[in-house]
Image: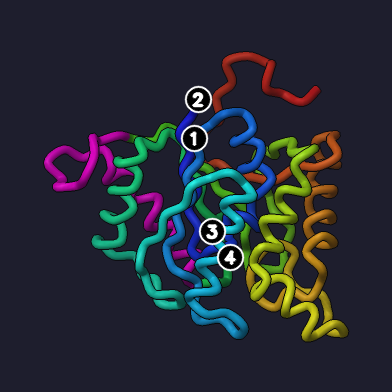
């Protein structure tokens, strides 16, 4: 069993970026914790209480626990305090694998959070740091795509998530104020971004299915989610490869 920490700048980023992979990890028996850096508010149709209910519902669908820091939405900055807060979560969870948004993005919060996580990974191993929990250094740091840029992801690997599509769709649709209500209020608007956040104007099932199907076609499966790694990915055998 692996201990996996998935960090999102806002509630819903993890689900939109890698919800099917999260569901697959849980099904395989791994310990998956979601960390929300902000409460995601304000948004046009949301409020803190509603958003908290939505994020709890999404976590229940995926079968994971989640915790939240109190960084201000739209004002996230790379600070020592933010680094230490994330490092504390890493140490308390004893995370072995970290997932954070891809580092190229139009959203300043996403870019700041990714830098925070990268540095918190280092801080979590420091001695005499005054942080909770025992020091640890997550062996793997991977990037998922929840980007606000209109471009095709450039993954270094994809995870076959065939059979977990519905879990992702349900977890995304749990964020009614973010992915359901906007579509109903603007049914004739042009399609928005294919991954997460912003003015999504396509039904979640449509854009999620399109994305999962496309990346599945790249590796010869029905569905897949893309990821990026700056470091070499190690294989102990060929058992993990889709042949």
Residue beneath disc 3: 56
Discs 1, 2 touching: Cβ within 8 Å: yes
Q: Is residue 115 left or right of residue 107?
A: left
- 3 or 1: mark nearer the eye: 3
Q: Is residue 208 left or right of residue 177?
A: right
Q: 69 or 118: which is nearer to us?
A: 69
Discs 4, 3 touching: Cβ within 8 Å: yes
Q: Residue at x 57, y 52 (%)?
A: 59
Q: Quadrant of residue 114?
A: bottom left
Distance in Å between CA atoms under marks 1 and 2? 7 Å
**Can you see residue 227?**
yes
Indicate which disc, 3 or 2, sits on the residue closer to the N terminus: 2
The numbered dot on residue 243 is none
Q: 33 or 78: which is nearer to us?
A: 33
Distance in Å between CA atoms under marks 4 and 1? 21 Å
Residue beneath disc 2: 1
Indicate which disc, 1 or 2, sits on the residue closer to the N terminus: 2
Q: Residues within 10 Å of mark 1 (few under 14, many from 20)?
A: some
Discs 4, 1 touching: Cβ within 8 Å: no
The C terminus - image quarter: top right
Distance in Å between CA atoms under marks 4 and 3? 5 Å
């Amino acid at each position: 069993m692996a201990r996996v920490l998935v960090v999102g700048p806002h509630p819903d980023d993890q689900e939109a970026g890698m919800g099917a992979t999260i569901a697959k990890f849980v099904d395989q028996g791994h310990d998956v914790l979601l960390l929300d850096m902000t409460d995601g508010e304000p948004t046009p149709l949301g409020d803190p209480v509603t958003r908290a209910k939505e994020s709890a519902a999404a976590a229940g669908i995926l079968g994971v626990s989640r915790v939240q820091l109190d960084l201000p939405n739209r004002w996230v900055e790379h600070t020592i305090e933010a680094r230490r807060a994330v490092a504390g979560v890493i140490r308390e969870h004893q995370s072995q694998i970290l997932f954070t948004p891809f580092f190229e993005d139009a959203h300043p919060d996403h870019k700041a959070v990714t830098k925070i996580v990268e540095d918190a990974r280092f801080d979590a191993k420091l001695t005499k740091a005054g942080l909770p929990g025992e020091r640890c250094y997550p062996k793997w740091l991977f990037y998922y795509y929840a980007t606000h840029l209109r471009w095709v992801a450039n993954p270094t690997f994809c995870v076959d998530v065939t059979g977990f599509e519905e879990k992702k769709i349900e977890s995304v649709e749990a964020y009614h104020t973010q992915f359901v209500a906007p579509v109903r209020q603007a049914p004739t608007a042009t399609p928005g971004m294919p991954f997460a956040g912003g003015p999504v104007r396509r039904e979640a099932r449509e854009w999620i299915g399109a994305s999962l199907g496309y990346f599945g076609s790249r590796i010869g499966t029905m569905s897949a989610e893309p990821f990026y790694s700056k470091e070499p990915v190690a294989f102990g055998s060929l058992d993990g490869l889709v042949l």
